Amino acid sequence: MSDRPAAPTHVRAATTAATAPARQPQEAHTIIRVVFALLPDSLALDWAGPAEALRIANRLLEASGRPLRFEVEFAAAQPELRSSVGVQLAGLMPLPGAWDGRATWLVLVGLPGRHIDVDTPEARHLLHWLRGQRLEAGQLELLTICGGALLAAHAGLLAGRRATTHHHHLDELKASEPACEVVANRVFVLDAPVFSSAGVTTGIDLVLHRIGTLCGEALAAQVAQTMVMPLRRGPQDPELSPFLAHRHHLHAVVHRVQDAVSEAPQAGWTVPGMAALAHTSPRHLTRLFVQHAGVAPLTYLRRLRLEKARQAIGAGASVTQAAEASGFGTDTQLRRAWHQFGLPGTPARPSAA
């Protein structure tokens, strides 16, 4: 990374619980207090990635002569705990007994495994504390990353809200809070004062979005560039890339064709050409694709081309350039596929609802 050490980053590890004076309105340049509430084995990337984005944002703000905007804290039921990768975290602050009137983001992160265990003493302590929180846009806002949404759900903070979580936890979230509208296959969902993300790297996308809203898109782009993120994802982007979809099978021949097609979706693929690669007939290849991948070969190809075109447009290409680069050939074919697969807006205005 290119940011230099030495300047203060306003990251707090240990402090005492604050007592709350009268609430104050958020000012244009007030510092946002960001509190990561951790449990033992909290997923390291869920909190470290977003915290780094906030630290870098502060550095870039300071370098440009602008006020710092974020003060990051880590809180838990005990002053020390182990992270998911085995690193011991120390100097953690207690879960705040009251807030101090500043605008605050409360961040909940995920845990390893396909099920979030809320029956541990630490989880019960955290849930009891969470149930006492009163969320309010611009004052106390909730950010959940990965399975952190399950903690919020068990605490009753997602009733009547739209939220997402890691695809492994979607059914668990629905069962934990039936009054929550669970949104599947989205990088993050915005329903102020609740902001939820699908998990792991998507927590960085969510925090970059919030940095952009608060400090300007130019700064968010600088943070993403410093973190070497080639593509920032937004609330309409799918959690699972089409390049990863339809691969949950064990058929070697189908995987061989999928590998070749995904490596160069813009090439002039036909079903006979794919079948030749698989050393089988076009009819049999189609049968294998439908049986094992759950999709026809040409539909699979169009999905990949559409994703390649969407990424090109996101990087600044015109509709014509994106159509040519992705293998559609013409604007009309790209627009037809865009509509067929239900992407929001149009290729020319992809963010339109």
Image: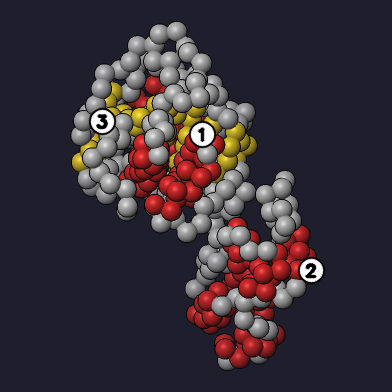
Mark 1 vs mark 3: in front? 1
Secondary element under disc 2, as helix, strand or loop, is helix
Q: CA distance from mark 3 to mark 2?
A: 55 Å
Judge by depth and name the residue closer to the eye, 37 or 321.
321
**Three-letter residue code for mark 1:** Leu
Residues packed near mark 3 inside 10 Å, few (<14), some (14 to 19) or many (20 plus): some
* Residue pointed to by mark 3: 13
Residue at image point 40% right, 8% down: 21
Judge by depth and name the residue closer to the eye, 7 or 277.
7
Place residue 81 in its image quadrant. Answer: top left
Residue at image point 27% right, 26% down: 93
Q: Is residue 170 visible?
A: no
Q: Is residue 252 visible?
A: yes
Q: Name the spot of residue 146 as percent of width and height, x first.
A: 45, 44
Q: CA distance from mark 1 to mark 3?
A: 24 Å
State left or right for residue 21 relative to residue 14: right
Q: CA distance from mark 2 to mark 1?
A: 38 Å
**Three-letter residue code for mark 2:** Thr
* Residue pointed to by mark 2: 332
Q: Name the spot of residue 34 as percent of width and height, x first.
A: 39, 30
With respect to residue 9, does 339 lie above or below?
A: below
Judge by depth and name the residue closer to the eye, 291 or 336.
336
Mark 2 vs mark 1: in front? 1
Labelled disc at residue 214? 1
With respect to residue 250, does 164 lie above or below?
A: above
Secondary element under disc 3, as helix, strand or loop, is loop
Image marks 2 and 1: residues in contact by CB distance under 8 Å: no
